[in-house]
Amino acid sequence: MKPRILYVILQFAILLFTLPVPAQAEDGVCPSSFAKITEDNKRFSVLVPKSSGLGNKQVYDDIGCSVLARNEECASRQNMFDGAALAYDHSTGAEFPVEKMYFVLKTDVRTPRGFGIVAFSSKEEAEEFSASHGKGKVVKWYELVDESLKR
């Protein structure tokens, strides 16, 4: 009986070591598959609900990744993305359309993929946060997508 148990354990160990690592497990890399929004990363995330023009729901666990993905689309899909995408207010966790949000970039905040961008529904809160977290810059969505993003 013991050799059979050892054989099963060995097979299980081999299976674990040969499974592919999900793309989102790599720190600093935007996942090619859909990321998962958790309570820990929600305030840095963007969600694009399922739509006829954009297809399945898209989830980005870092605002910077959503900008990169959006900018790879053609102009008409960029417009659909802009109109559908939702970001979470950094202070409250409430969901708002990205076009109505204020984004603080170049902060000292560590985000899931290292872009350091946070979103606020209030310009005043964004400016206050920017002043207290590095040399942040407050921008609207259309200014953010024109930025040259760096990690």
Image (cartoon, rainbow, N blue to C red):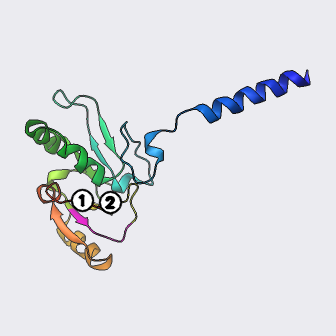
In the picture, measured across the screen, residue 81 lies left or right of residue 48, that is left
Q: Quickly name the residue at label 2.
A: 115
* Quadrant for the C terminus in the image: bottom left
The picture places residue 30, in percent across and down from the top left corner, at: 36, 47
Q: Amino acid at mark 1?
A: Leu
**Residue numbers of the magenta segment:** 103-109
In the picture, measured across the screen, residue 64 lies left or right of residue 81, that is right
Residue at the image point whose x is 19% and y is 68% from the top? 138
Q: Amino acid at mark 2?
A: Phe
**Location of residue 94 with respect to 11 vertically, above or below:** below
Do the residues bearing badges 1 and 2 touch, measured as CB atoms within 8 Å? yes
Judging depth in this view, the residue of 105 and 45 nearest the camera is: 105
Q: Which mark is residue 149?
A: 1
Residue at the image point whose x is 18% and y is 46% from the top? 71
Residue at the image point whose x is 33% and y is 75% from the top? 133
Q: CA distance from mark 1 to mark 2?
A: 7 Å
Asked whether residue 101 is drawn in magenta, I would say: no
Mark 1 and mark 2 lie on one chain; the one further toward the N terminus is 2
Residue at the image point whose x is 17% and y is 60% from the top? 147
Judging depth in this view, the residue of 30 and 63 nearest the camera is: 30
Which quadrant holds residue 53? top left
The picture places residue 12, in percent across and down from the top left corner, at: 70, 29
The picture places residue 56, in percent across and down from the top left corner, at: 28, 29
